[in-house]
């Protein structure tokens, strides 16, 4: 709301004495509570139904309904049960994450000090009210440490500075003043909800509450999130298989009708074949893997994963974008050096600066020193106590220096001025040449990434009249004090861990490039590239670089620094990196970071972030800590490796079985396997594959980003699927030529039993060799997958001669078959091992 303070009060029908209780109650009823809009949280049922949109889940549901339509009730029951379990697991996992986040969610503020009157003639009283009860026109008081409870226009202020980085990204406190400035669009007299008062005090009138604040508006502006890495990879694989699955039943029906004269009676078998290709357990295994890892992260690392697929995306990221302040540094400056006019170290300069800081703090009644003064006092301690303070002229809006006046030699006062080098040197008695030399000295220090404070003094005869800024003249230059940001504990080790994991760190900061580069070097990193933010979206897209390459502004490896970043620049850089093929994570904590959080594959926010940033993030950290991200990346890769292993094993095995079934349907005078036998085989294989959700991948699989790339993945399952089909066809040959001569194929029960056993044994071999082969070769104990494979092989051998086998239409196999089967499986294991070594699996 623009205009002078008087104009604003008139528009709000208020005054400096505040509102009456009756007026406040009426306005509260009209405007509603002063709370930002709460994000909509879908119910468990809606979350479960949303899971049906996943490609494999939708296909499984369709096949289950088709199975019910053709009266294949066993197949339909199992498929629909798997769909229900998958949707329920995903819904409850996301609901649990939302409850964890609700426990971390913080209110913008608890109470506010407001001036209220009982009636028009009463004296206004200052008392605490809940921030939810504030209304436009209320007059509030702000002090150090307060959170601004609504959008307010200052009426009176004294040395007020606020942190509004959650809204604007400005890392330094911003001075605010109640003065009616001529610029109508200035924000210097406005404070916004969510800002924090650093120093000073003020009286202000509330101009906007609830959904009408700038804080709430920022939460409504983000664009919807684009598909993440998990969505793109799984959907790419899913739809390629869906197309093949949709072709399978018509092919089986047409082949049966054309070759054997069988028509609709083959429909249950055709549906069973399509189900045989489907990785039925994928939704369950994906949800179980991700949910187990998410629960472990929340319990041990206090990392809340709000969207389960985001855990896979964490394992896939190869670029992590972070800011500098609060992540790599503590946003707390420390003194680096104190230099005399000759550029050499001079501790006396530090002492004078500390004296000025001490008496400025004491005489202006500030509740706490600013960050630079605190750094001076931490190092030099309370050196000002040896002097008597006379007066102080603090920093103010438009004024970049502060002066303390102390008692000097008898009959004299000593002025000690510190501040920006340009402002201090302008007030010193220096020749033009000397002033330029000292400005160059300050510029050289600033170019190394340090913040620079100039110090000057003046000896004046003592007096009783007040000191003013006009007295800051004819000063004697004493020297410079330089500062650098204190490094965050563990930041260097965390960055090395991320680098070892193959994650390239991009530092997006609003600071000077030299400052960010210096921080990187102090952390032991040599930035591969330092540049300023792109000036437009086209430059951001072209500057994103390419995966693994060194061309372009973003090299293929090493730390990258992007300086002078605005919030819009951060989102453009993230979008550009994704457009170049990278999987990108972004760590942010302010309202200004929401666009970048939504633009990334994985948005990460700390618990103390602005509420809208937490709601936009996929992952919430207890603290803004890179160490926790490293653990989350490892957990994501562990889950992704298990999911990828499951898909490789089940799809290559299923594809081989389907190809063999299609060939057998054309060659045999009877169905190669009864639908109930196909279902039983699938149930056994599916049960064994639950072990993938509990497996521990080899360490080598955790050292690089885990991405499911559909083209390479489909080539893998096609190659190994064809190999599996060859093993099945070899089994046909054994049955046709080795068992009792050519008439053996007339015994359908023997054929069905033999193929059932061979299928389960080959599937057990695939599980063992493609997953646990390296562990067994090193002499290690078999993991969950190894034990599951052994159990699957035992079931394959035990079921045909058992009563269950008889109920399924199977019979005991002749002893000679087992010897021949062992030979076929031995050759298959050898071929599988050779193919695995050649592909580097």
Image (cartoon, rainbow, N blue to C red):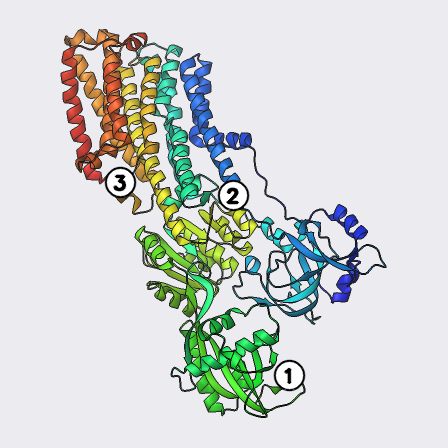
The x and y percentages for residue 361 are: 57, 74
Q: Tell me the quarter of the picture where residue 38 sits.
A: top right
For this orientation, the residue located farthest to the right is 121
What residue do we see at 39% from left, 14% from top?
267
Measured as percent of width and height from the top left, residue 782 is found at 23, 32
Q: Is residue 738 left or right of residue 800?
A: left
Under circle 1, the secondary element is loop
Q: Which residue is mark 1?
A: 468
Mark 3 touches mark 1? (CB < 8 Å)? no
> Which quadrant of the view contains residue 143?
bottom right
Cα gap from disc 2 to disc 3, whole angstroms: 32 Å
What is the distance, in whole Å, between disc 1 and disc 2 at their CAs? 52 Å
**SS under mark 2:** helix
Quote the CA–CA distance across marks 3 and 1. 71 Å
Q: Nearer the viewer, mark 3 or mark 1?
A: 1
> Residue 518: image x %, image y %?
38, 68
> Can you identify the residue that label 3 sits on?
698
* N-term-proximal mark, 1 vs 2: 2
Camera-side mark, 2 or 3: 2
Q: Nearer the viewer, residue 327 or 70?
A: 327
Residue 302 picture location, percent across and down: 44, 45
525 in relation to 67, above or below = below
Residue 582 badge: none
Q: Which residue is mark 2?
A: 101
Asked whether 395 or 674 is in front, the reply is 395
């Amino acid at each position: 709301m623009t205009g002078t303070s008087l104009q604003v009060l008139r528009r709000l029908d208020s005054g400096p004495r505040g509102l009456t209780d009756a007026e406040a109650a009426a306005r509260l009823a009209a405007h509603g509570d002063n709370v930002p809009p709460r994000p909509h949280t879908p119910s468990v049922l809606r979350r479960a139904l949303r899971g049906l949109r996943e490609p494999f889940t939708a296909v499984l549901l369709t096949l289950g309904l088709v199975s019910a339509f053709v009266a294949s009730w066993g197949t339909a029951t199992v498929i629909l049960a798997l769909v229900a379990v998958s949707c329920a697991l995903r819904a409850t996992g996301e609901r649990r994450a939302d409850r964890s986040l609700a426990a971390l969610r913080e209110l913008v503020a608890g109470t506010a000090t407001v001036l209220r009157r009982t009636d028009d003639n009463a004296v206004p009283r200052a008392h605490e009210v809940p921030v939810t009860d504030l209304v436009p026109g209320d007059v509030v008081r702000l002090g150090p440490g307060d959170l601004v409870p609504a959008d307010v226009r200052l009426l009176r202020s004294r040395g007020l500075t606020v942190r509004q980085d959650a809204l604007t990204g400005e890392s330094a406190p911003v001075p605010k003043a109640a003065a009616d400035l001529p610029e109508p669009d200035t924000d210097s007299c406005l404070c916004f909800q969510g800002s924090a008062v650093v120093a000073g005090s003020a009286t202000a009138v509330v101009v906007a509450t609830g959904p009408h604040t700038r804080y709430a508006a920022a939460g409504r502006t983000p664009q919807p999130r684009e598909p993440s890495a998990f969505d793109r990879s799984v959907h790419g694989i899913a739809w390629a298989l869906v197309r093949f699955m949709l072709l399978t039943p018509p092919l089986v029906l047409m082949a049966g009708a054309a070759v054997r004269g069988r028509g609709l009676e083959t429909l249950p078998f055709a549906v069973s074949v399509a189900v045989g290709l489907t990785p039925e357990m994928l939704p369950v295994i994906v949800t179980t893997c991700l949910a187990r890892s998410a629960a472990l992260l929340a319990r041990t690392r206090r990392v809340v994963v709000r969207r389960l697929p985001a855990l896979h995306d964490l394992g896939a990221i190869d670029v992590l974008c972070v800011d500098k302040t609060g992540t790599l540094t503590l946003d707390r400056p420390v003194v680096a050096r104190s230099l005399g006019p000759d550029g050499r170290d001079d501790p006396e300069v530090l002492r004078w600066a500390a004296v000025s800081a001490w008496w400025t703090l004491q005489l202006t009644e500030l509740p706490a020193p600013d960050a630079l003064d605190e750094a001076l006092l931490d190092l030099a301690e309370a050196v000002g106590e040896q002097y008597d303070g006379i007066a102080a002229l603090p920093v103010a809006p438009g004024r970049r220096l502060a002066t303390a006046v102390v008692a000097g030699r008898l009959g004299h006062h000593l002025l000690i001025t510190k501040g920006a080098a340009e402002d201090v040197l302008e007030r010193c008695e220096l020749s033009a040449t000397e002033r330029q030399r000292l400005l160059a000295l300050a510029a050289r220090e600033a170019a190394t990434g340090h913040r620079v404070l100039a110090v000057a003094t003046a000896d004046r005869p003592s007096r009783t009249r007040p000191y003013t800024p006009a007295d800051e003249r004819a000063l004697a230059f004493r020297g410079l004090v330089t500062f650098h940001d204190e490094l965050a504990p563990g930041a260097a080790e965390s960055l090395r861990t991320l680098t070892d994991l193959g994650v390239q760190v991009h530092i997006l900061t609003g600071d000077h490039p030299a400052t960010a580069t210096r921080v990187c070097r102090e952390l032991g990193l040599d930035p591969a590239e330092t540049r300023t933010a792109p000036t437009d979206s086209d430059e951001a897209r072209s500057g994103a670089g390419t995966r693994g390459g060194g061309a372009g502004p973003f090299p293929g490896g090493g730390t990258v620094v992007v300086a002078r970043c605005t919030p819009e620049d951060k989102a453009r850089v993230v979008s550009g990196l994704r457009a170049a093929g990278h999987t990108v994570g972004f760590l942010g904590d302010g309202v200004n970071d929401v666009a970048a959080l939504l633009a990334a594959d994985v948005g990460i926010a700390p618990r103390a972030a602005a509420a809208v940033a937490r709601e936009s993030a996929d992952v919430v950290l207890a603290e803004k800590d890179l160490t926790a991200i490293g653990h989350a990346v490892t957990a994501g890769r562990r889950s992704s490796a298990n999911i990828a292993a499951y898909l490789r094993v089940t799809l290559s095995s299923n594809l081989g079985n389907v190809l063999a079934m299609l060939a057998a349907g054309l060659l045999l005078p009877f169905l190669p396997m009864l639908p109930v036998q196909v279902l039983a085989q699938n149930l056994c294989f599916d049960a064994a594959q639950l072990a993938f959700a509990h497996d521990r991948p080899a360490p080598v699989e955790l050292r690089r980003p885990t991405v499911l790339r559909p083209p390479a993945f489909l080539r893998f399952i096609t190659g190994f699927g064809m190999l599996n089909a060859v093993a099945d066809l070899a089994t046909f040959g054994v049955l046709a030529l080795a068992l009792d001569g050519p008439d053996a194929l007339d015994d359908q029960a023997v054929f069905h039993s033999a193929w059932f056993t061979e299928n389960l044994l080959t599937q057990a071999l695939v599980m063992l060799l493609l997953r646990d082969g390296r562990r067994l070769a090193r002499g290690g104990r078999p993991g969950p997958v190894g034990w599951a494979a052994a159990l699957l092989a035992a079931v394959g051998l035990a079921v045909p001669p058992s009563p269950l086998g008889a109920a399924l239409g199977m019979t005991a196999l002749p002893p000679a078959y087992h010897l021949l089967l062992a030979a076929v499986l031995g050759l298959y294991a050898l071929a599988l091992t050779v193919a695995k070594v050649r592909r580097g699996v």
